[in-house]
Image (spheres, rainbow, N blue to C red):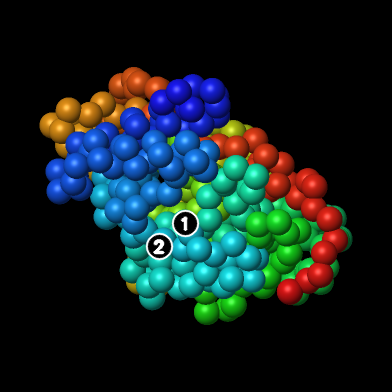
């Protein structure tokens, strides 16, 4: 213990490690002798400044991190998260290939499976690998062409940075899939095209009439977040992409509807012959409902897993009750838990939540936000 006290960073890691190891053994009674495991971890930290999780600890830690995610409404099934332990991978090529495999396995032909792939952690003297994309699948944004925006405005700066890195760009549609940008350990960022069979997409059409048939809307099916750091017991895994399945409003009320994203409500209203001359006609509200109907119906017809905000709100309330029975309080961020459409008619709206953050967790690293804007990329050999 004296060696730990002389090294502040090691002492911090030990304190966080002890808390997690005790949690793991408390929630997994068959895990063995907790004091023996703590002794091994303490010795490892004294020598190396860090320690290695067992596969069982990694699995439980990743699942509890989902359970602790204050911004996620879909935590009822946290204990069913599939954990792919690929901590031995440190190179950009193999990580990019493993990310494509993640998308194939998680996509599962439309029956989406909550999945996380964990790559090498940060260790003293060597940062772990990094995935620059905020999600494994994002659409390019090309800025204005001919007076209108092409693609997703959110990704314009990232798209420009990847093109400087050597990506020639896609065909110029509103839904060109961006390449992955991966930085291996002791490496520079490099870009990798995602194989077509790794990107499951759903055409978006309205369930009534054919006025949308020529529109060409679509969205990808696996929302795999790759810009967050998994933290378990003081160990950080900067490359750990994870996914659940989409809630319809994420696409229909945000990605496709936000004015700084695809901003489709005016075009939806035009196609539905709505009166847009005055906001008091509630044309935006009516267009929003119809766009969300189209998203839900399209995923259903394609046989791809998607939930709606009413169902997910009820599931979240069930999650609160289940966790209460286990003696655990559930933290939540109200602004993220309440859906961006019809919030007041869901049960999650009419209450407050404890916003305390707990570990293990998925961390919002400010550097990841800068990477998602393409800041700091340097030209390197394209893959």
Please give the name of the residue rendered at 34% of the width and 32% of the height, measured from the top-left corner: 18
Tag 1: Cα neighbours inside 10 Å, few (<14), some, or many (≥20)?
Answer: many
Q: Secondary structure at mark 2?
A: strand
**For this view, does 288 lie left or right of residue 328?**
right
Extreme-front residue of the structure: 2
For marks 1 and 2, give the CA distance.
6 Å
The numbered dot on residue 84 is: 2
Q: Is residue 200 above or below residue 141?
A: below
Given residues 101 and 207, the one toward you in this image is 101
Please give the name of the residue rendered at 60% of the width and 37% of the height, measured from the top-left corner: 365
Tell me if residue 85 can be seen. Answer: yes
Please provide percent x and percent y for residue 16. 41, 31
**For this view, does 237 lie left or right of residue 33?**
right
Residue linked to disc 1: 118
Q: Are marks 1 and 2 in contact (CB under 8 Å)?
A: yes
Mark 1 or mark 2: name the one nearer the start of the chain. Answer: 2
Quarter holding the N terminus is top left
């Amino acid at each position: 213990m004296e060696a730990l006290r002389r090294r502040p960073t090691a002492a911090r890691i030990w304190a966080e490690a002890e808390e997690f190891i005790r949690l793991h053994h408390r929630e997994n009674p068959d895990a063995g002798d907790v004091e023996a495991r703590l002794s091994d971890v303490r010795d490892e930290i004294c020598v190396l400044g860090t320690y290695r999780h067992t596969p069982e600890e990694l699995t439980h830690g990743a699942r509890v991190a989902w359970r602790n995610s204050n911004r996620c409404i879909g935590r009822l099934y946290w204990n069913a998260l599939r954990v792919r332990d690929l901590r031995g991978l440190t190179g950009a090529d193999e990580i990019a290939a493993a990310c494509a495999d993640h998308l194939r396995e998680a996509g599962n032909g439309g029956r989406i499976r909550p999945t996380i792939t964990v790559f090498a952690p940060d260790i003293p003297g060597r940062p772990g690998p990094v995935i620059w994309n905020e999600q494994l699948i994002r659409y390019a944004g090309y800025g204005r062409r001919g007076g209108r925006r092409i693609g997703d405005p959110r990704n314009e700066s990232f798209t420009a940075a990847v093109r400087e890195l050597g990506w020639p760009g896609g065909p110029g549609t509103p839904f060109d899939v961006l390449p992955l940008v991966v930085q291996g350990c002791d490496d520079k960022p490099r870009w990798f095209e995602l194989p077509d069979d790794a990107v499951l997409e759903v055409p978006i059409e309205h369930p009534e009439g054919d006025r949308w048939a020529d529109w060409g809307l679509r969205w990808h099916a696996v929302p795999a977040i790759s810009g967050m750091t998994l933290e378990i017991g003081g160990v950080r895994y900067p490359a750990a992409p994870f996914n659940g399945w989409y809630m319809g409003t994420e696409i229909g009320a945000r990605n496709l509807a936000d004015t700084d994203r695809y901003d489709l409500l005016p075009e939806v209203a035009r196609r539905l012959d709505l009166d847009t001359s005055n906001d008091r006609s509630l044309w935006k509200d009516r267009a929003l409902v119809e766009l969300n109907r189209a998203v839900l119906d399209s995923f259903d017809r394609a046989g791809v897993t998607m939930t709606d905000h009413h169902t997910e709100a009820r599931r979240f309330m069930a999650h609160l009750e289940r966790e209460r029975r286990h003696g655990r309080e559930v933290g939540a961020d109200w602004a993220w838990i309440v859906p961006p459409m019809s919030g007041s008619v869901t049960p999650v709206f009419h209450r407050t939540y404890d916003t305390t953050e707990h570990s293990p967790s998925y961390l919002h690293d400010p550097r990841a936000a800068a990477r998602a804007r393409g800041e700091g990329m340097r030209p390197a050999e394209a893959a």
